Amino acid sequence: MSHPHPDLSAPAPLPAGGLRVIPLGGLGEVGRNMTVFEYDGRLLIVDCGVLFPEDHHPGVDLILPDFDPIRDRLDAVEALVLTHGHEDHIGATPYLLRERGDIPLVGSKLTLALLGSKLREHRLKETVHYEVAEGQTITFGPFVLEFVAVNHSIPDALAVVIRTGAGVVLHTGDFKMDQLPLDGRITDLNEFARLGDEGVDLFLTDSTNAEVLGFTTSEKDISPVLDGVFAKSEKRIIVACFASHVHRVQQVLDAAVAHGRKVGYVGRSMVRNMAIAQELGYLTVPPGVMVEAKELADLPPHKQVLISTGSQGEPLAALSRMSQNNHHFVHLEEGDTVVLASSLIPGNENAVYRVINGLARLGANVVHKGNSLVHVSGHASAGELLYCYNIVKPRNVMPVHGEVRHMRANADLARATGVQNVVLAEDGVVVDLVDGVAKVTGKVEVGYVFVDGTTIGDVSEASMKDRRILGEEGFLSVIVVVDSVTGKVVSGPEIHARGFAEDESTFDDIRQPIIDAIDAAVAEGTNDSYQLQQTIRRVVGRWVNRAHRRRPMIIPVVIEA
């Protein structure tokens, strides 16, 4: 990741009366959102999410924000505020609570319900939590928090106003300005304007769609498109979307009822989240429409609808298994229709297209955002951001939530509306708001924290590089037995390879050069097995690079006999 401030040193102590902002994730990437605010020696955290691994993170399940900069100050944390219930905003919370289990949690009803389910899954006791809604105010230490309704691709999303002696901060969370949302809950632009009239000292704005011109399409525009898909489909329909996209699931349920189909959920997170949404009243399930997914097979194909996880091509999710024809009870047939009702998270393109190709190979008709309006974004496009800058009239702007190109585009929009001070930061870059002016004052070291099975943080960048080499370049081991007295080779070299050349005859040309190199090293006085291993690694590395244009991981083993 490139950094706009590569030479920054650790920040100086925060001046009295100043507010410090430290993004630990989410700035320079789409995911693992986490921002720490410091005032008067106390800390407030907004969001604590995960980033999902890409192809260059082999063996990794999740990527967490780096807690190191605040690890020795967790007792100073007043609260963790969660803006909405998506994984990239709440998913790392269980890992933070393992380090301090009594951090107060603040969020809306649906957000806390989804998080509670996650904490139980991690076998963590629910810590004290404060359920809030738009219009409410709550105080934690020196932080006075107000909440503003915002529209997003999950119900109950909130922007948060943070008041301290340093000024007023408005953090949008993820948001858009859908004027016809399915739940009728629009972004409260009246409140944004009122805050603008009062004076917003620092505006942290969602950058994800800043490069997209105009306004984000309304969710309601999808309903007739889905209706058309249902009308044309003569066999089974499978809709894949995020397990938290309550609005999209509602539209599928409504279309299923209109066309006389029954619906089943596939995927553990989908089943769990929709049960929570239905119980709390965010999802309306018409009577008689739901059946257990396994029981759908008893119905004719034209009566079946499955709502599945796996819209991002996740290898272990239900849709990926279907595309490989190895799902335990869903087997696609010629003429089935699969709808990918989701956006493409940057970095997931190859995985998604791999799934689409697998589905098409099995004879499915695949409907996706590239060929039909079956998904709209949950993020504000450029027109909406411009509108917000004009009504909020912030003194300082700090783009958040997005890759570098998204944040830079957002910064340009802010400047175009006349904002004088726009601060571009990335993960770890420290921004201080002092005397009404925000500026970069230093940098703390942050990195990726990888979750690999039950292991957290033990997978380093170096070991990740080794995994990539293994996956891309292959593995080669060389075993040689030498006489412990003379140093002469008495057995081997025995060569084993994986990933690029598994025919043993491939290595006939290098066996004698290995023996010669060992003899030469011993003749020069080398009798240490480690040094002999390094000799083997150099000889084999040069040969394999020259002969095969590969750089495999080479593991030499020298045994003294």
Image: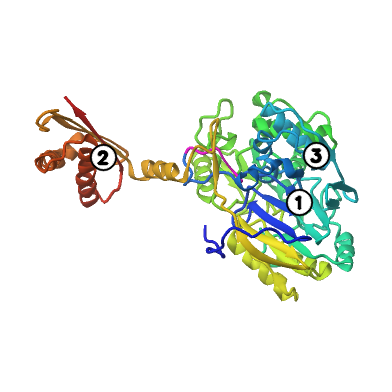
Residue 261: tell me if it is visible: no
Which range of residues does the magenta coloring cover? 59-66
Which quadrant is the C terminus positioned in? Answer: top left
Residue 142 to residue 291: above or below = below
**Residue 51: x and y, percent?**
60, 45
Q: Residues within 10 Å of mark 2 (few under 14, many from 20)?
A: some
* Disc 1 to disc 3: CB gap under 8 Å: no
Disc with the residue nearer the chain's start (1 vs 3):
3
* Disc 2 to disc 1: CB gap under 8 Å: no
**Residue 263: x and y, percent?**
72, 32
Q: Front-most of 22 and 513? A: 22
Per the image, the residue denoted by label 3 is 110
Q: Amino acid at mark 3?
A: Leu
Per the image, the residue denoted by label 1 is 152
Q: Looking at the image, which residue is at 20% across and 43% down? A: 535
Residue 209 to residue 227: above or below = below
Q: Which of the labelled discs sits on residue 501, or is there none? A: 2
Q: Secondary structure at mark 1?
A: loop
Q: Looking at the image, which residue is at 73% across and 60% down? A: 204
**Residue 171: x and y, percent?**
77, 56
